[in-house]
Image (cartoon, rainbow, N blue to C red):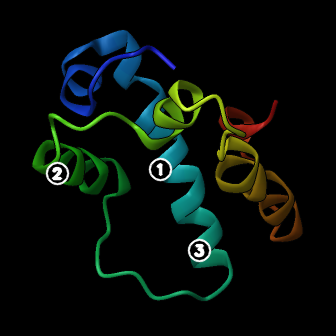
Amino acid sequence: MTGATVGEVIANAGAWSVAPVCAMEAYDVARGQGIALDFEDASEYVRRFGSAIAGARPSMFLDVLAVGPAEVDVINGAIPPLATRFGLSAPCQRR
């Protein structure tokens, strides 16, 4: 919710510090569910994907600009209960 583009978030150490942790939590939950992923390093995957859309604004920020409901509860909110189900934790995505 910085107002920055994806590329600006990646370039800012403070803003970027959250993304790889969230990615790893989601990656661990997917693996816990037996979902096969075609990458091993969630942080690098997110950085590479984000770099490909560096000029884009994050979709949750677009929700705020549109004065609509933010998707944060659907996206990030799904991870903590699933993590708990698989004996994992997801503190970065808890509110």
Q: Which of labels 2 and 3 is toward the front?
A: 2
* Circle nearer the N terminus (2, 1): 1
Residue flagged by tag 3: what amino acid is it?
Ala
- At a point 40% along the width and 15% down the height, the residue shown is 3
Q: How many C-alpha atoms fall within 10 Å of the one at disc 1: few (<14), some, or many (≥20)?
A: many
Where residue 56 sits, quadrant-wise, is top left
Q: Please provide percent x and percent y for residue 60.
A: 53, 37
Q: CA distance from mark 3 to mark 1?
A: 10 Å
* Circle nearer the N terminus (2, 3): 3
Q: Nearer the viewer, residue 66 or 17?
A: 66
| Residue beneath disc 1 | 23
Residue flagged by tag 2: what amino acid is it?
Arg
- At a point 32% along the width and 68% down the height, the residue shown is 40
Q: Secondary structure at mark 1?
A: helix
Q: CA distance from mark 2 to mark 1?
A: 12 Å
Q: How many C-alpha atoms fall within 10 Å of the one at disc 3: few (<14), some, or many (≥20)?
A: some
| Residue beneath disc 3 | 30
Where residue 5 sits, quadrant-wise, is top left
- At a point 77% along the width and 60% down the height, the residue shown is 83
Q: Nearer the viewer, residue 70 or 90?
A: 70
Q: Please provide percent x and percent y for residue 57.
A: 32, 33
Look at the numbered discs 3 and 1 and tell me whether their residues touch, using CB distance below 8 Å.
Answer: no
| Residue beneath disc 2 | 48
Q: Does residue 78 lie above or below 95 as drawn?
A: below
Residue 51 visible to the viewer: yes
Residue flagged by tag 1: what amino acid is it?
Ala
Q: CA distance from mark 2 to mark 3?
A: 19 Å
